[in-house]
């Protein structure tokens, strides 16, 4: 991770992890951001460990290597290797399932335990398209984020609301932290 120089100038590569309870939409947030794809019947992630997305900041190429769990979170067995070297994290709950919001402090603890550096963190309330069965208010999300010092955003991987924004705020914050 970090920066390196070559003929084309500086390059940045940042590892970002996505964490949160099972079925909150982590894999779909990543596929929406990286490939503009959504899967209504997505099963536990198989195979792909991470996807890389590039963006330009201050005229420099910044690459985000975004890691998705392979479904280990169901067994509370996300390993320390998953967190190692992460400079950013999206901590995700499902606005239609309160228990996933109540798990957030545990995920933040786990992240803290495993990280060795400043991590740019975004609290993400996903599935905001499910307004009719909302179980966590926007205010509750905001207030938790404020008290924990996190960015906050509600997203929908289904209709794309704020997905790009959520990732890019984290990537820009990391860039600001290291540059
Ligand atoms: P993960 O276990 O956290 O990786 O969750 P997945 O990405 O596999 O998604 C779990 C389920 O929620 C799947 O059926 C998805 O289609 C659905 N899902 C994911 N994101 C959204 C969203 O923004 N809105 C709605 N309505 N469903 C979603
Ligand atoms: Mg998944």
Image (cartoon, rainbow, N blue to C red):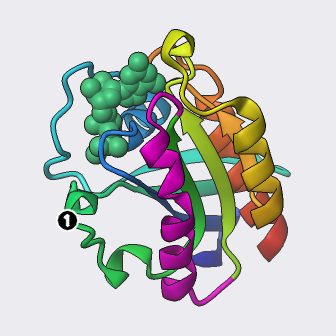
Q: Ligand 1 is in which quadrant of the figure?
A: top left
Q: Is residue 84 left or right of residue 139?
A: left
Residue sitting at 35 percent across and 54 percent down? 68
Residue sitting at 71 percent across and 79 percent down? 118
Q: Magenta: predominant secondary structure element?
A: helix
Task: Assess whether residue 100 is covered by the magenta stretch.
Answer: yes
Q: Is residue 125 left or right of residue 60?
A: left
Secondary structure found at label 1? helix
Q: Residue furthest top?
A: 132
Residue identifier under label 1 = 75
Q: Report if the beta carbon of the residue with label 1 is closer than 8 angstroms to ligand 1.
A: no
Let me know if residue 60 appears in the view.
no
Let me know if residue 100 appears in the view.
yes
Residue sitting at 30 percent across and 58 percent down? 69
Binning the other alpha carbons within 10 Å of mark 1 as few (below 14), some (14 to 19) or many (20 upward) gives few
Task: Assess whether residue 126 is covered by the magenta stretch.
Answer: no
* Quarter of the rendering occupied by the C terminus: bottom right
Q: Residue 77: x, y in percent? A: 24, 73
Q: Residue 79: x, y in percent? A: 29, 78
**Of residues 61 and 92, the one drawn nearer to the viewer in this rendering:** 92
- Above/below status of 29 relative to 107: above
- Above/below status of 98 relative to 107: above
Q: Which of the 4 quarters of the picture holds residue 148?
A: bottom right
Q: Residue 104: x, y in percent? A: 54, 58
Q: Residue 112: x, y in percent? A: 58, 81
The boundaries of the magenta stretch are: 95-117
């Amino acid at each position: 991770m970090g920066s390196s120089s070559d003929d084309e100038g500086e390059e940045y590569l940042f590892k970002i992890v996505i964490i949160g309870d099972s079925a909150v939409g982590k894999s779909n947030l990543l596929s929406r951001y990286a490939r503009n794809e959504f899967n209504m019947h997505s099963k536990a992630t198989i195979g792909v460990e991470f996807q890389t997305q590039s963006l330009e900041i201050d005229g420099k190429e910044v690459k985000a290597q975004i890691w998705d769990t392979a479904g280990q979170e169901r067994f509370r067995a996300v390993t320390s290797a998953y967190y190692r070297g992460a400079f950013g994290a999206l901590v995700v709950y499902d606005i239609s399932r309160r228990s996933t919001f109540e798990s957030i402090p545990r995920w933040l603890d786990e992240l803290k335990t495993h990280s060795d550096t400043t991590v740019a963190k975004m609290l993400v309330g996903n599935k905001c398209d499910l307004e009719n069965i909302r179980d966590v208010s926007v205010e509750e999300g905001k207030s938790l984020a404020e008290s924990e010092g996190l960015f906050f955003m509600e997203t929908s991987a289904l209709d794309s609301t704020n997905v790009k924004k959520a990732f890019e705020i984290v990537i820009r914050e990391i860039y600001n932290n290291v540059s």
